[in-house]
Image (cartoon, rainbow, N blue to C red):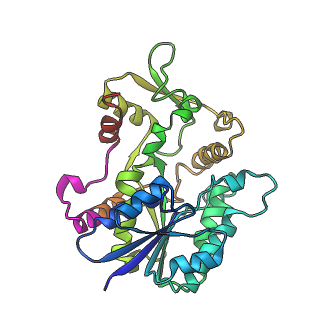
Amino acid sequence: MSRLITVFGATGAQGSSVLNSLAANKSQSFSLRGITRNPSSSSAQKLAASGIEVVNADGWDKDSLIAAFKGSWGVFANTNSDDAVFENPEEKRTELDLGKILVDAAIEADVQHFVYSGMASATETSKGKIPVEAFDPEKHAIGVYAQSTKHFKTVTIVSPGWYFENFLVQEMAPIFGGFPFIPSDDGDLVLRCPRWGGKEDVPFIAIGDDFGDIVHGVFLEPEKWDGTLVQGVSSMRSFTDAVQAFEKATGKKAHFEEIPNWQNLEVYGIRALETVKGMFGFCQKSGGRYYGVETENDTAAALKVRASEAKGIFGDKAKLLTLEEWFQREFRSK
């Protein structure tokens, strides 16, 4: 019997990665449904053309969500901290409010396995020194709420690290020194940001290549991962290592420059970047513990292998992507 998995945020980077991975499963029968507010968008139409059922629902409309979740064995959900609705200073609704609606709708639809893209608590991790809004009263709290309901057979938090794909956003390059698009006066590409803290093991994640497989692996054995926070990490590298990987892959000169005080990172009042700024602060205060504990990717690697084998992929192709491999693919010819 086919098990239906429904993805909230189907056209986003995380949701599309999850759907693409699950759609390639050859070992068991999953049927897939993607939720979007705009089924006529090109990204939604692409999903539909691939055989995925696309349904219209709004996260603030509980009834539409219940209908969209109906019949689902599992749900993957990602809420967007940077949604335009939260940019309105008069808006009283929060991401936590949205998350609770999602959880409650999944309960009423009798979903068995709930996987949420959440985060550890920045407040707990930094011992109250650096709270970060998107982490604590929002994403961390949504995961806690889902677990507290005691309705689901399993609840798993899969927490993505620093997207490889952030390096493709040209608008972000000037904020971080110009890397990897805008050379400095001496011709080098400079990555400029605060240090990470601790062992400087930044948790980089290839969202398109690895994140979906990690979630896929969880759905293959949901009971095994019940109540856990799975670290979504492709590669643990310092920022110096990252630019060296870029140099090796592309042959272009690059280096890292540290901003000594994380509070001096200029974010130009951009709300999403305020979160990034706070992230640097709490990681430094906690010794680099972005996940509340030591960063590791053995779990992600095992889940990647599990999902890859379910897709008929073995050997080196079942391994997590490295920064060198990704930089070579994305920048070698540019």
Q: Residue 241: percent from the left, percent from the top? A: 39, 35
Q: From the viewer's perspective, is residue 257 above or below residue 236?
A: above
- Magenta stretch containing residue 302, yes or no? no
Q: Split into 4 quadrants, where in the image is the C terminus?
A: top left
Whole-percent x, y for residue 27 in the image: 23, 74
Compared to 166, does 55 lie above or below?
Answer: below
Residue 299 visible in image: no
Viewer-nearest residue: 242 or 94: 94
Residue 29 appears at what percent x and percent y? 29, 77
Quarter of the N terminus within the rendering: bottom left
Q: Position of residue 164 (x, y in %)?
A: 43, 44
Which span of residues is magenta-colored?
305-322
Which residue is at 60% across, 48% downward?
279
> Of 182 and 201, which appears nearest the observer?
182
Residue toward you, 109 or 279: 109
Task: Determine the residue located farthest toward the right in the rendered image.
Answer: 90
Q: How many marks?
A: 0
Which residue sits at x=67%, y=33%? 264
- Work out which residue is located at the far left of the displayed protein and give it: 315
Left/right of residue 334 with respect to residue 76 in the rendered view: left
Q: Is residue 101 visible?
A: yes
Residue at 27% across / 67% down in the picture? 306
Is residue 311 on the magenta stretch?
yes
